[in-house]
Amino acid sequence: MLVIVDLDDTLCNTWEAGKSALIKLMIHLIRKRRFRLVKYLLLGKYRSFESIKRYHLLGPGELIKDVLLALYPDIERAEVREMVELVEGEFFSKLRLYPDALPFLMGLKELGAKVALVTDSSSEWQRKKIERLGIAGYFDDIIISGETGHSKLEPHNFVLAVERSGEERVYVVGDRDDTDMRGAKAIGAVGILVRRGYFRNRIVRNADYIVKDLFEALKVIRDGEGNKGRAEA
């Protein structure tokens, strides 16, 4: 059995940490009188990144640089670096595993599952999160869009995880329907959507199960494996 797991807002509180970083950035921008960027953030124009493949391969620092240069073509590099460092510092000071993350990962190991982390963003940004959270040892494979050149808007990384594992029974656990659950459907896996984080109120079209936390997700997997064992017996 293979369980493909998402990182952001599935295992850790990325959106909550991100909101804290955005608030700190806006205070800084108001002091610097960078009102165009304040307006950009308040109007939620960053949401346009959600469906653009390129931005799923980049880290927040690179996204911030892109936005700053678009709004302020003559901005000095030192000011860009200052804002990037401010955002990254605040983000990582607030980043935490959800309370159910470690019990979930340990529960999968008790079931004898192989666990693959499939996540979008730059290699540096995601590997820094994994290191800070101390969870690398729970995964048999780690696939990051910034390393493969393919985001979860396409099935490539899900297919890659299955091919590397050699497993036929596959579950996908994540918080986003149009990436994680659509990816699950593309590879014939059971998709378990965890309703939390930035995408928690989005319309669901692809998930097989919708759960409120990883304890419920683990129960779905345990029940599924138990039923399969009884059918084989």
Image (tube, rainbow, N blue to C red):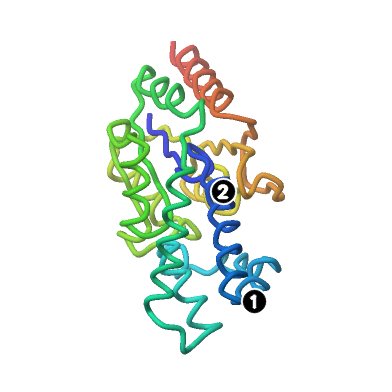
Instruction: Estimate the x, y position of residue 37 in percent, counting from the top left.
Output: 60, 74
Q: Residue at x 42, y 50 (%)?
A: 119
Q: Are marks 1 and 2 in contact (CB under 8 Å)?
A: no
Q: Which structural element holds mark 1?
A: helix
Q: Nearer the viewer, residue 217 or 102?
A: 102
Vertical position of residue 229 compared to residue 124: above or below: above
Residue situated furthest front in the rendering:
31
Amino acid type, callout 2: Trp
Q: Residue 35 shows which numbered tag?
A: 1
- Residue 132 vs 26, above or below: the answer is above
With 42 as the anchor, is 85 left or right in this view? left
Seen in the picture, residue 216 relative to 124 is either above or below; the reply is: above
Position in image of residue 224 (x %, y %):
52, 22
Three-letter code, disc 1: Phe
Name the mark nearer the viewer: 1 or 2.
1
Q: Earlier in the sequence, mark 1 or mark 2?
A: 2
Q: Which residue is mark 2?
A: 15
Horizontal relation, residue 156 to residue 98: left or right:
left
Label 2 element class: helix
Residue drawn at x 52%, y 84% as measured from the top left: 72
Q: Based on the displayed image, in which of its 4 quarters is residue 229 positioned?
A: top left
| Residue 148 x, y percent position in the rendering | 32, 60
**Is 179 situated left or right of 151 in this image?**
right
Q: Is residue 49 above or below residue 174?
A: below
Left or right of 53? Residue 131 is left
Query: Which residue is at the front of the view, 80 or 229?
Result: 80
What residue sits 64% from the left and 31% below the top? 212
Count the marks: how many?
2
Closer to the camera, 175 or 46? 46
